[in-house]
Amino acid sequence: MKRLSKAHGMPNKDILTLEKELEAFRSKPSGSEIVSVLNKLANASLKAYPVKAKAYVLEALDLAEKHELPVEQAISYRILGIINREAGNFTEAMSYCRKSMDIYETLGDKNNMAVIHGTIAMIYRDWGLIDKTLEHYHESLRLKQEYGVREEELALCYFNIGSCFNTLDRRELAKSFYEYAESLWEKSGNLTHFSLFYHNLGVFYGKNKDYDRAREYFHKALDIREERGDKRKIASTLGNLGYLHSKLGDSQSALDCYARSLDLYEELDNKRGIAYTCGSAGGVHIRLGHLDKAEEFILRGLEIARKFKIKDREIHCLEESIDLYEAKGDLQKALMYSRELNSCKEEHLNEKSIEKIAGLQVQFETEKKEKEAEIYRLKNVELSRMNDQLRGALTHVKKLQGLLPICANCKKVRDDDGYWQQIECYISENSDAEITHGICPECMIKLYGETCIQE
């Protein structure tokens, strides 16, 4: 891998520049210009200052609606979708993204439609619906290929698809997508993309129990993310490092990582992150015998998960609750939380099922996505052509089905219009079979006598 260039300028400098522009426009209001700057400020503030970002984008949306600026409205809706996703408000996040998508579809803007599909995919990913996540990442990739974006942007789609396969434990397939994305990113030297790449490689090697390599990649990702001041991603990497240290038996390092991660999630008001980190820190305190401290963390995480209906985090905290009360010797509470866990898992499964296409199995969806992904990734034109030919051939297959009226005497067949015709004609017209004639042994004897039969 070639040496990466350092990032030029910190996010705060961009924000300061935009704030100066905003003040200039406020003194001389000019419609679309001030809305554009407000949206840019909201987008630049998302990672480090989410409260300010929300204030900026709400003002931008109000002005965009007032001045009938559909493009700026679409941008504002997407930013609000991201803000709500970060807070774990997935229903609201999806609603805003759908509004943004409606505008871009009306405008025929395929590039931004692809961007919204990517945002929707991330919402489904956090929601735990990986098959829907794959569906939207594939659509984002298709639109970007059709629009003709840079390879660097396509690489992000390949990488995200790889992450989905990693979640589904299809690790070799995930690795092939990661490597393909890396080959495209190497040309750009974009540190943001490489932090994402390193983080997910850490997850990949962690799942494969190669903890040394996992830790190496998590620290590489953390160095870049801290340099760039991306608080949410710093918190995510710290959380993964905490989990890794816990698996390695280094409880104090795990708690240190969880504490730093929790501080950042609280600053960002990221309920999903807070609930997970509280549950995980509680689990470490159980193993250290700090049962009162563990109870404080776990019950806090459980309360947040339930309040904001974050089912997978609720399940995580309930699992830790069972361990906690078993360690305390309070088997009645352990049994109570065990029952709640079973009920929660069932509810979570039902909620997922509602989001899926009725009747389709997850395995079928995953295999279908794998095949589509390979076509996209390898651009295998010949395979696509063969699939088209097969689909075309299937549309021409004709089948004889239902009741077929045949004369008991002459063996003619009655068609749908009530006409009687020779069975050979009927079969030829209603199937792709070609009729040839021969004489069976019994008819041969009737017609020509036994002397004509040859052994």
Image (cartoon, rainbow, N blue to C red):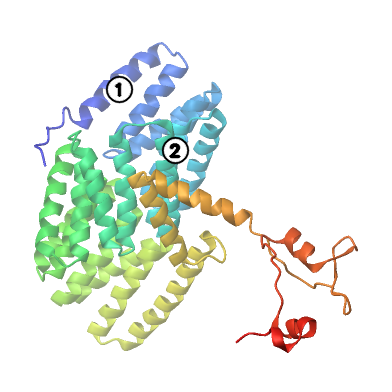
Look at the picture and state if 365 lies above or below 30.
Answer: below
The front one of 111 and 96 is 111
The front one of 418 and 5 is 418
User: In the picture, which quadrant includes the N terminus?
Assistant: top left
Tell which tag, 1 or 2, sits nearer the viewer.
2
Left or right: residue 306 versus residue 160 is right
Q: Residue at x 40, y 60 (%)?
A: 128
Q: Residue at x 18, y 56 (%)?
A: 202
Left or right: residue 58 versus residue 222 is right
Q: Residues within 10 Å of mark 2 (few under 14, many from 20)?
A: many
Name the amino acid, label 1: Leu
Between marks 1 and 2, how big is the CA–CA gap?
A: 31 Å
Name the amino acid, label 2: Leu
The tag on residue 453 is none
The tag on residue 18 is 1
Tell me the element at label 2. Answer: helix
Tell me the element at label 1. Answer: helix
Q: Residue at x 69, y 66 (%)?
A: 436
Look at the picture and state if 296 lies above or below 330.
Answer: above
The front one of 411 and 391 is 411
The front one of 107 and 409 is 409
Q: Does residue 73 appear in the picture of this structure?
A: yes
Question: Which residue appears farthest toward the top when viewing the image?
Answer: 28
Residue under numbered circle 2: 143
Question: Which residue appears farthest toward the front when viewing the image?
Answer: 451
Give the x, y percent position of residue 298: 29, 69
Q: Residue at x 34, y 14 (%)?
A: 24
State which quadrant residue 21 falls in: top left
Give the x, y percent position of residue 384: 44, 47
State which quadrant residue 16 falls in: top left
**Precedes in sequence: disc 1 or disc 2:** 1
Q: Residues within 10 Å of mark 1 (few under 14, many from 20)?
A: some
